[in-house]
Amino acid sequence: MNSGAGGGSGGGCAGAAARSRGGSPGGDGFAPSALGTREHWDAVYERELQTFQEYGDTGEIWFGEESMNRLIRWMQKREIPLDASVLDIGTGNGVFLVELAKFGFSNITGIDYSPSAIQLSGSIIEKEGLSNIKLKVEDFLHLSTELSGFHICVDKGTFDAISLNPDSAIEKRKQYVKSLSRVLNVKGFFLITSCNWTKEELLNEFSEGFELLEELPTPTFSFGGRSGNSVTALVFQKT
């Protein structure tokens, strides 16, 4: 979907402006948006695939390069084995997979529901000369049975986009948590980066079957004399 790249600005962020604290008709504080639809992301990655084929441009890094480094630093600090199975949920252009592979991780899989995204990430991975990365066209809300047994699942913006789906977003978020429980091993780690959800809100969304392990430091911003974090990055562990 959109953890690798996408049509956002300033490092990519799926619909931060769509958040309405006053609440939406769905009752979850989000205004429905095209950013929550498959049609939008198919169009985005068809364009990016064409751009890559013509100019060799890999596209935008979702949440910026620092977001990838932050996750890899955490994996390094936790001494995650290099053969641990890692799933990138909504891999987009696959740039995070490339970084993992360059770091030495050897059992990594990227999924996306957009065939154009998987084609794009496959082209980028091939250009980088990497062969130990698995790619699959998969809708995380409707998974095939063979996708399971991961030690680490990573989400950079996919849960954000699902939250903006105009059709039953609340139900889709619940299904996301069920899918996550299915693919992640017990005691496995879930690393989520979001620009639509606060720490407290994410704790609530993933309260069933997951516990917060730690919050990762993210850049802060100041506006009108108040400081805050535009991005939330959390590590959960499956209980």
Image (spheres, rainbow, N blue to C red):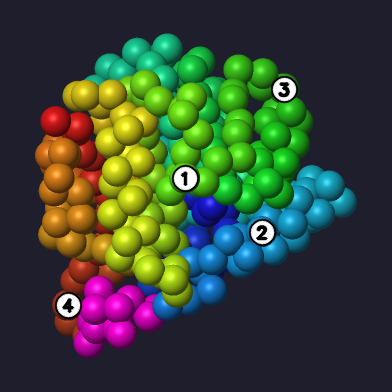
The answer to which of marks 3 and 1 sits earlier in the sequence is 3
Side of 127 relative to 1 (left or right) = right
In the image, which disc is placed on residue 226?
Answer: 4
Q: Where residue 198 appears, x then y in whole percent?
A: 21, 62
> What residue sits right under mark 3 in the picture?
129
Characterize the magenta stretch by its predominant secondary structure: loop
Side of 169 relative to 199 (left or right) = right
Q: CA distance from mark 3 to mark 1?
A: 31 Å
Q: Which amino acid is tagged 4?
A: Arg
> What residue sits right under mark 1 in the picture?
142
Q: Which residue shows up at 52% across the image and 54% down it?
A: 2
The answer to which of marks 2 and 3 sits earlier in the sequence is 2
Instruction: Give the answer, above or below, for where 201 lies relative to 218.
Output: below
> What residue sits right under mark 2 in the picture?
42
Q: CA distance from mark 4 to mark 3?
A: 46 Å
Q: Which amino acid is tagged 2?
A: Asp
Q: SS at mark 1?
A: loop
Side of 186 relative to 219 (left or right) = left
Q: Which residues are magenta?
A: 18-31
| Discs 2/4, front | 2
